[in-house]
Structure formats: C-alpha cells, structure tokens
Image (spheres, grey):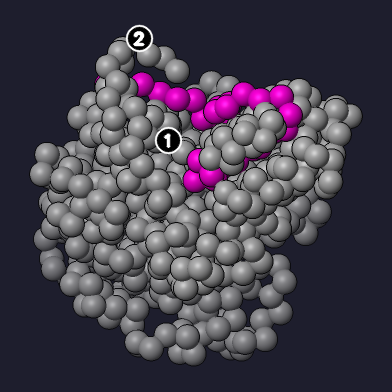
Amino acid sequence: MSDPNTPYAIRTYDAETLKDALRKMFLIRKFEEGAEDSYTRGLIHGTMHLSIGQEASAVGSCMSLSDADKITSTHRGHGHCVAKGADLGRMFAEFFGKEDGYCRGRGGSMHIADVEKGNLGANGIVGGGLPIAVGAALSAKRLNTGAVTVCFFGDGANNEGAFHEALNMAAVWKLPVVFVCENNRYGMSTSTEKSTAVKHIADRASAYNMPGTTVDGNDFSAVAEAVDTAVAHARAGNGPSLVENLTYRWRGHSKSDRNRYRTKEEISDWMARDPILHMSALLVEHKVMSEADVAALETETAQVIQDAIAFANASPAPTAAEATRFVYTDGEAA
Amino acid sequence: MNMQNAPDIRELSYAEAIREAMDIALGSDERVVLMGEDIGVYGGAFQVTGDLIDKYGPDRVMDTPISELGGAGVAVGAAMTGLRPIFEFQFSDFATLAMEQIVNQAAKIRFMLGGAVSVPLVMRFPAGSGTGAAAQHSQSIEAWLGHVPGLKVIQPSTPEDAKGMLLAALEDPDPVMIFEHKILYKMRGPVPEGHYTIPIGKAAVRREGKDLTIVATSLMVHKALAAADDLAQNGIDAEVIDLRTIRPMDRDTVLASVRKTGRLICVYEGVKTLGVGAEISAMVAESDAFDYLDAPIFRLGGAESPIPYNPELEKAVVPQVPDILNAATELAQGRL
C-alpha cells in the first residue's frame, strides 16, 4: 500500500469508505435516472438539470468533510446533495413538490438543501452560491468552528462577477473555503472556449493568490486527492484554493436542450470515460471489491431509489392555504 | 417604546444614534460584525461607524473591497451560519450592484428552503437627495426593495428611531433593510441611553390633527411637520403620520387616521409613480376608509426624473415644504 504508484484513494481510505463512495456514485446516477424517468412519466412539474457523468466530482469533493462542514451547490446539484449525505426519499419528495421534501415542496430541484448535513443549498442563480460560501467560511473563522466550506460551481459561473469578488475576498481574508469548479465544458450551450479567456479555469487562482489545480474530474481518486489537499490547507488556516474538475454532463443542460452545440461523437467519447466504471475498476483492481460485489451494490442502490420514489409518491402535498408560509420567520416555530 | 431600562435621554445626532446602537450590539453580542466599504479607519463615507474600529478591531468592523455583490453575498452566507452582520452600502445607489444577493438570495432563502434556515441580516442604505451628489448618489430606491416578499424595509426619521429600530432589526430573524436619509445624519434629537427597541411595522403619529392626514416617510416627515405648523396658522389641523416601515406597512394606523380626517396626502421622496404613495393610496382605496374620504387622495413624490446636480433643480424634483403646504391647503379647502 505504500507504493507511490498506488492511486491516492487506495492509499488513503479504508475499504468501507471506498465502498461507500462508490455506493454514493451509484445513488447519484440512479437518482438522476429516476428523476428523468419520473419526468418522462409526467410526475414532475418544472425542469431539472441532471449530473449524470459528473458523479466522481461530487463524491470525490466531499471525502474529507464532516456534517459540520458546509457546501454550497448549483442548479445541477443533486449529486452534491447525495455526496453530503442526504436522504434520497426526502430528495425525491422535494423533487415531487411534497411536504416531506427537504424544502417542504417550496424549493424543488434547484433549491434542495440539507442544512443539518451542512448543505446550504443548491442555487438557481449561476454564481449565486459563491459569495454565500465565503460568508459561511467567514462565520467558521470568526466563530472558531473549524469548519471548511466547499463551494461547487460550474464553468459558466467563472465569468460571473460574483466568482471574482468571492475569490478575492476569500483570499484577502484567508478564509477556509475550497472553490470546486465542475467544468463540464458548456454553460448551457456556450463552450468554455467561446466564453473563457483562460485555458484552465484553475489558472484564475493565480489572480487571487491561491493554489489552483486542474484534475480529471471523472477520476474519483484524482478529485479526492486535490480537494482533500485543499480542505486540509483551509482547515490549517492557510486560506482558500481553487480546484477544477474536468468533467462532462451526458444529458443536455435541461429538458429543453436539443444538443445542437455538441456532436454525438463527443458525447459518446465522454460516456466511454464513465466515472462509475472507472471507480469500479479501481476498486476491483485493488481488491477492495469483487465484480460481484459491485454488481450487488448497483442492485442494492437501485432498490434504494425505488423505495425513495415510493416514499415521495406517498408523501402529502402542501396545501394551498400554506402557499405563502415560510416567507418570514415571524410566527413560525424555529 | 419600552423605556424601563432607558430612563436617561440626551441629544444625539442621527448618525451618532446609529453608531451607539451598533456599539451596543457589538459590545453585547459576539456574533455581530459590521461590514462595508471604508467603514474602518475612515469611519464610513458619512462617519456613521466613526471610531468603532478602535474599540472592536478590524475583525468586527470589516472593510470590504469595493465589491457590493460579493460583499452582500458574504453577509448573506454569514447570516445563514451564525453571524449577525450589519452591512453598510456606501450609498444606497450602489445596492443596485448587489440586487442579486438581496433579492434572489437574502429575501428568498428561508422560503425556498421551506423554513429550514433564516437569514438574520441587517443592511443599511444611506439614501436620498440634497447633497449635490447627482443622479447616481442620490436615489431613493426603498420601494424597489419594498416590493420583495421576504425583506423588511424601514425608514427611521429620528435619532431615537434610528437607534431603536436598528436594535429591533438585529433581533429580527429575517433580513431588514434600513434606509437612512443622508440629510438626517446630522439632525439631532433626544435618544434614550442603553438598549431599547422600536418595533418594525409600526407607524408613529407625529402630530395629531382632524382636518387631513399626511402620511410621510423619512426626511419628508420633517417637511410635513413644518408644513403642518404653517397649516395650523391658517386654521387647518393636519395629522402627520411617520410611516417608519414600508414593508410590512402599518395599515391600522393609516386607515384609522383617514377615517378620522377624511383627507389623505402621501409624501415621499422616491419616484412618485409605482412608489410608496401608490401603495398607501391603494390600501385606503381598497378598505372601508375609502367611504370616509371627502376628497381625492393626493400624492407628492419624486419627479419622473433622475436627481439633477444643480441645487435649484435638485430641490425641484423632490417634494418641498411649500409643495406640501399648497397641496394640503387645496385639499382642505375642497379644491382638489
């Protein structure tokens, strides 16, 4: 195990931790597939942004976080929520607009949060979570909680003013935050080549005097190594870092996407670089799991999703009489 | 107002009263932090934070970069996770750069998350014209934010209210936006010592009268009171209501006054159309108080124009005492 050629994840985590990571990756994939299927069957009101193909980025970025640590997420945030330990039934209930959902049906796919597990929420505004993550890191520093915040954002957000203002403030105040850019190559239809003046978004870290790293975002071990390093750096009081996970969304931006900005070949090339297959192969190769174990895990997670969907279907809908509840705290039990 | 613990009253300026409130808050609650541009050693563009940095240091009185959007968002995130930030915009006009975080985030997070978290955030907005700072440093945009469910929006008009309502805002679990008219900063008035609060959402009857009701906000309260003195000399007895909060609006106080006087003038510095006066007027028109009206409702608001630089033009685009006097006289004499 001390062989330096052994991948970071194998050197660093015990077998149970690695199995749990693969399990979460399966759960994300199957949550997204279940969401898509539910949409197709007319159970979903509204749209959704699926993260199929980006599972290693979500799970690998949360490996050294506890429930006390925070994340902020994006409109493509189901994976982050699962990675931070959310209950799948409550996630589906939110997706279905039900009272048992994480937001009691008021937020939906784009606002799922799980505050008790440290997930401060997905965000419907590109770049909206970046300054909020810095604020959470400011609280951690001032209140001496020792918590680190991981801020997920996409390549599209790196051209928002909020990105630049947030990174600058985090660096000036040396706050415990890790900016994790999930570069899936397109902000909706506009490629990073068309939208972004630097080749690697991580290059922008140098403008804010923080470490910047670009990794293969479909390689769980590479993501985990980069983000664990950045989290440790933050936790030691050394301030923020920027990690760029190069990845790809297999599905379109949302349900309206006709995929006219990319080729079938490009999509299939990336599908061949499936992060779940990559992770499974790694664990089999290093004898953490057998192929039969992996197959059993996949079957088990599929059942979890079926149970979660059943829970969500059975959950009551909020009543119209409570449509404006939760606007203000007044009169509500905290 | 609860005066039990605050028996000693002395005169302070409006700015000093705000500073005293922040001093009390910083001294009694470690979660409170001040954030804003040049609020540290500079003391704030209007010297509201003054020397608080000397007492509390740069970690509690934080100079932010000139990054209104990011700064506001940091305050939102900090408020969600245990701090009680008081965020100062250098001029309320600059809040236009931060609308995303105020409107999409601060106002909606509690709702979007089904009540799982609150955003106990206080933001301060130096507002209004009269300083010769022209169109981008003189606006009154409180009605913009008053249109956003999830926010509370207040406009204290006296030093006593400025202190008590800021302390109330800090106790409020939801985001409170405080619009402070820059011309009021140097106005002096009695301010109780120590900690006290003045409730958000409650208007104040500043002058009782029977002939007509003037509902005013912020600096316009003082202009309305000056006009009311002149009106009294002409035998017209005006009631002046200081609205103090535009969201949530104190319906009961306004309607009770209109039922009594039968006449209503709304005076506010923000642009007249789609402004605070439109809401007050509609509130009356949609209620039983409408039946008590003896004359049409009259609005005096800002002109349909940016604020000009030239001092005479600057005065011309916002209501002045003679405007209120004329409107009230016409209304009381049945000519409107």
Residue at the spot 80% in from the left edge and 30% down from the top edge: B262
Tag 1: residue type?
Thr
The residue tagged with tag 1: helix, strand or loop?
loop
Query: Is residue B82 in view from this perspective?
Result: no
Q: Name the residue that disc number 1 marks.
A: B158
Subunit under mark 2: B
Q: Residue furthest right?
A: B291
Highlighted magenta segment, given as a residue range: B194-223
Within 10 Å of disc 1 (Cα), the crowding (few <14, some 14-19, many 20+) is: many
Q: Name the residue that disc number 2 marks.
A: B4
In space, the residues marked 2 and 1 are separated at their CA atoms by 20 Å
Within the magenta stretch, is there residue B28? no
B129 shown above or below A136: below
Subunit under mark 1: B
Report x, y in % for residue A286.
29, 60
Query: Quarter of the image holding residue A258?
Result: bottom right
Within the magenta stretch, is there residue B221? yes
Tag 2: residue type?
Gln
